[in-house]
Amino acid sequence: MEGRAAAAPPPGAGPDVWLAFAEHIRSRAHDGRPLPVPAPPALRLCHPRGWIREAALAEPEAPVELVAVLTTDWAAPVRDRARARMERTLHAQPQATLRAVTPLALRLGRRHRGDWILARFQDALRRQAQAATPWWHLPAPPAAGGGEWAPDGTTAAVLAGLLDSPDRQTRQFAVRLALAGPGRADAVECARRAAAEPDPATAALWTDAALAAPGSEDDAVIGVLTGARIPAVRAAGVTALRRAGRAAEGVTHLADGSGLVRACARRLVGQDGGDAHGHYRWLVFDPAGPSPHAVAGLAECGREEDTDLLRRLVAHPAGPVRAAALAGLRRREAAVADSVLLALLDDPAPAVAREASLALLPAVRRLDPSYLAERLDVRGPLHVRRAAFRLLRARGGIHALRAAVALIDDWHPRTRMTARAVVCACPWHPAEFGGEADTAELAALLKRSAKLFDDYGLGVRRNRLGPRS
């Protein structure tokens, strides 16, 4: 738009890139900048004038992704011509088009006029799923797309390729179509897909299919599910142990890293007549050292006799165990001396300092703010500074403002952003601080943080402090 021939995004750039490209080119054209001569088809397809977009649809080099975007165009002539071209492209190159445009079609389907392209692609893929053999019996997808539409393994490989798409929404869409197709799902393959899937919602679809398929009680299926990365998938595998007659194995999952899996394991052990609480105590007293997840599971059992044991574990040499013990005491609302928690703010383990600060939140009013302010030094450990800042923010008033102003230039991005948000949200009125600070100190703090405000905002805050600020 600045007189240079801009290139379109490369193939496989992703749906969000194409939508951002179209929006950016159209917004820049509204500024009155002339099109480069000759203008590439990608630029003319995004032009704000409808007759230019419509004429660009006749170009053979028009990217199919931008043609898909124009199927939702507000101008009816542009929209109709784009839909006609998309129909021809789908008929001529169904595999390549479905693979390239399906992620974009799912996003366009949310638009006001996006129902056409979404329904068209759903119908095309559904016909493939219904006409072809089930996807799990197919060979690997071919390297190059294209070819005629035929109900064989080659066209069904399009759906198999979408199942491995890097786009999360596309995978969910393809999973639903694949599982609704003919034939019976393979339980082991569905379990493997669930274990390898990073998206929880998509993994849940695979997990439900694996447990509903014949052979879901096999050791291979349950073993894959219980070894998955996502906790909900592991929890489903642990729950399936009882149906497979392996409820006694629930004890091996009592110390899982997920609270959901631990809860399922405790229920399974209880249904089998076992004692999950006794097993937790045995794990905590393990001579090799307790697992922090076993400590968390013991606290989740909620028995009063475990409180003293958790207090002793606060002094354990392993940081994760100390953090788990603190979290368990906080979960049970067990009292811990303020002096002990304040000392743990300087713990070398970040998780321990965080749990100590969370346990001190109800008692923040009786803490010495100067003790906390001393831990805001930028040369100190980050986790100590963040724990002290959390408590000072909870205390509020001038102590929170002083801490926030001291951290507006902190090297840690999240801490710096939080401090600046506290400064900007401050009312900067002396009456709001209940006599804790005078106008001179507030004016000095405002001067140190003046760069956070524009001229108008800075003037408003100075007027609240009075004429001498």
Image: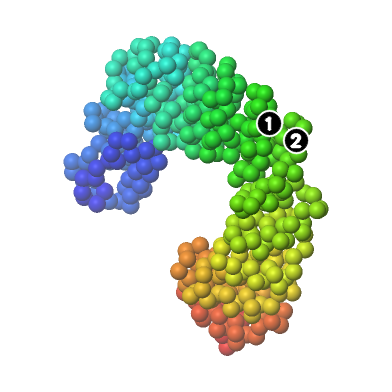
Q: Amino acid at mark 2?
A: Gly
Q: Mark 2: give few (<14), some (14-19) or many (20+) Cα within 10 Å.
A: some
* Mark 2 lies on residue: 274
Q: Position of residue 88 (x, y in %)?
A: 32, 20
Q: Amino acid at mark 1?
A: Ala
Cβ atoms at labels 2 and 1 below 8 Å apart:
yes
In the rendered structure, the answer to whether residue 188 lies left or right of residue 397 reads left
Above or below — where is 255 with respect to 370?
A: above
Above or below — where is 430 with respect to 345?
A: below
Residue occupying image coordinates x 29% and y 17%: 147
- Nearest the viewer among 17 and 175 is 175
Question: Where, by quadrant of the figure, is residue 5 drawn?
Answer: top left
Q: CA distance from mark 2 to mark 1?
A: 8 Å
Question: Where, by quadrant of the figure, is residue 264 drawn?
Answer: top right
Q: Taking the image as drawn, is residue 263 in sight?
A: yes
Identify the element where label 2 is drawn.
loop
Q: Which residue in the rendered view is the most extreme toward the front?
A: 287
In the rendered structure, the answer to whether residue 75 lies left or right of residue 247 reads left
- Nearest the viewer among 343 and 316 is 316
In the rendered structure, the answer to whether residue 1 lies left or right of residue 397 reads left
- Nearest the viewer among 339 and 190 is 339
Residue occupying image coordinates x 62% and y 35%: 235
* Mark 1 lies on residue: 248
